Image (tube, helix red, strand yellow):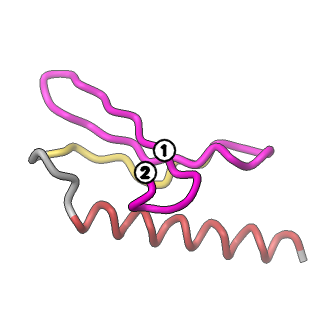
């Protein structure tokens, strides 16, 4: 899911409705779920992409702080 960030992937779940999960699995210590949501239209909304980006940014800042 390059529109969210480098290394971010998307899981698509179909259970009568459409659901999505953005996650990052490029770090050794964990798989980080950035955002999970129910998709209402064909295109992923700008709000959901921006929320995924913001959470990825927060994660990267937190990881840098923990490495200091």
Mark 1–mark 2 contact, CB under 8 Å?
yes
Which element is circle 1 on?
Answer: strand
Answer with the quarter of the image where residue 62 lies. Answer: bottom right
* Marks 1/2: CA–CA distance: 5 Å
Quadrant of residue 25 within the rendered picture: top right
Badge 1 or badge 2: first in the primary sequence: 2
Q: Is residue 52 left or right of residue 29?
A: left
Query: Is most of the magenta stretch helix, strand or loop?
Result: strand
Q: Is residue 60 left or right of residue 5?
A: right
The structure residue drawn at horizontal position 40% and vertical position 35%, both measured from the top left corner, is 11
Could you say whether the residue bearing mark 2 is in a helix, strand or loop? Answer: loop
Q: Residue at x 13, y 23 (%)?
A: 16
Residue tagged by mark 1?
9
Specify the segment rendered in magenta. 2-31
> Which one is nearer the viewer's eye here, 55 or 42?
42
* Neighbours of disc 2 within 10 Å: few (<14), some (14-19), many (20+): some
Q: Position of residue 45 (x, y in %)?
A: 20, 60
The disc placed on residue 1 is 2
Figure disc tally: 2
State yes or no: residue 29 in magenta.
yes
């Amino acid at each position: 899911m390059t529109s969210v960030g480098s290394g971010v992937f998307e899981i698509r779940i179909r259970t009568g409705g459409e659901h999505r999960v953005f996650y990052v699995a490029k770090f050794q210590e964990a798989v980080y779920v950035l955002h999970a949501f129910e998709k209402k239209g064909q295109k992923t909304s700008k709000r959901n992409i921006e929320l995924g980006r913001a959470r990825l940014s927060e994660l990267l800042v937190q990881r840098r702080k923990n490495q200091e």
